[in-house]
Image (spheres, rainbow, N blue to C red):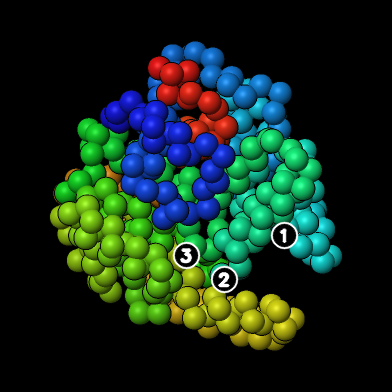
Amino acid sequence: MTTRPDPDVLATLRHRSLLTTHDYTTAELEAVLAVADRFQQLDRAGASTALLPNELAYAMFFDNSTRTKSAWAGAAARLGMQPVIVDGSSTQVSHGETAEETGAMLGMNAHALGVRHDLIIGEGNTFMHDVKRGIDNYLAATDDSRSVPIVNLQCDIDHPTQTMADLLWLREHFGGDVAGKRIAVSWAYSPSYAKPLSVPQGLVSLLTRFGANVTLAHPEGYDLLPDPIRWAHEGAAESGGSFEVTTDMDAAFAGADAVYPKSWGPQALMFERVAANKARDTAGLHDIEQRALAMNADNRDWICDERRMALTNDALYLHCLPADIGDEVTPGVMDQFRVAVAEEANKKVYVVMALLAAAKVDDLAARIA
């Protein structure tokens, strides 16, 4: 599916954190994907991959998670590390501790740190940068030579371990390449409103870099942030793929080879929600929620159903899970792809393994050959 990782490219990833896929060159992403694919092969063969024994892998979650927590724990354990999941609400951040202080406190003991901070638009990725600065400053001040990479386990901008897992799954499905494949990334109805924009943003800005023809579909008012849209256009131009945006879900599905229908919040109201939270405006928050739910309800027909799947080119259905069955996708479509989306989710274990090993293991290509 993927080639052997390039040792020279892997060398550029030593001590590196991943805060968005945009931070890595396409060659560096290819190297990570190749390592992930190799780890998958070794794991399925029952081979040991304990390259980082006796190391501690913290993961700090400010939002609920099943698959990403499992992936982090599974990846760390397979590498011989001790995974520890930290509930973000149990930290002192809400009591005034800065992100830099949190980073220093965790980094003084940890050997790697994953962070999920996706609920507050405009804050999550910034928090991760500040945590990284806190860790780096502590290590420098104490003359500590340890490498403590940060892995973005979802923020307000990107969900890189998810989207790289999606790319691995798409490549496997299509025999090794997504170049020229038509992929629809679409909004879908949900009865809840405060869902992050990061998955569709990460998908359009990543898949276009690998030659895919990506169509983003959403109703009016559900625009993504400007930077990921710009990255998607740039990636398509550089790779020979394409990127377009439509307000017609049927048009996005027509002839698609893969579809990824998922809900996210209306951007303007997500920013209003941040301001209301900071002002502790309970009445304002309630009003924002009601307006957002009303916007969603106006678009109940945005569902991945059998009729829309019939418009596609026998498309593969993808989702980061959990899907709102009966709202985002019909039970019949989900039943058809239930095993497929589980296989898709499992790829995240190997992506996390690859990111940690690439950042921390010398001569990695030779050690996993």
Task: Kindly identify which residue carries mark 2.
Answer: 122
* Dot label at residue 64: none
Q: Secondary structure at mark 3?
A: loop
The quarter of the picture where residue 92 lies is bottom right
- The percent coordinates of residue 105 (x first, y second) are 79, 48
Q: Secondary structure at mark 2?
A: loop
How far is mark 3 from mark 2, CA to CA? 11 Å
> Does residue 90 appear in this view?
yes
On screen, residue 110 above or below 20: above
The quarter of the picture where residue 80 lies is top right
Disc 2 residue type?
Gly
- The percent coordinates of residue 174 (x first, y second) are 23, 37
Disc 1 residue type?
Ala
How far is mark 1 from mark 2, CA to CA? 15 Å
- The structure residue drawn at horizontal position 59% and vertical position 19%, both measured from the top left corner, is 50
Tell us which disc is closer to us: 1 or 2.
Answer: 1
On screen, residue 358 above or below 204: above
Q: Earlier in the sequence, mark 1 or mark 3?
A: 1
Task: Kindly identify which residue carries mark 1.
Answer: 99
Tell us which disc is closer to us: 1 or 3.
Answer: 1
- The structure residue drawn at horizontal position 81% and vertical position 62%, both measured from the top left corner, is 97
Task: Kindly identify which residue carries mark 3.
Answer: 197
In the rendered view of the protein, which quadrant contains the N terminus? Answer: top left
- The structure residue drawn at horizontal position 20% and vertical position 46%, both measured from the top left corner, is 179
Q: Earlier in the sequence, mark 3 or mark 2?
A: 2
Disc 1 residue crowd, few under 14, some 14–19, many 20+, Cα 10 Å? many
Disc 2 residue crowd, few under 14, some 14–19, many 20+, Cα 10 Å? some
Disc 3 residue type?
Leu
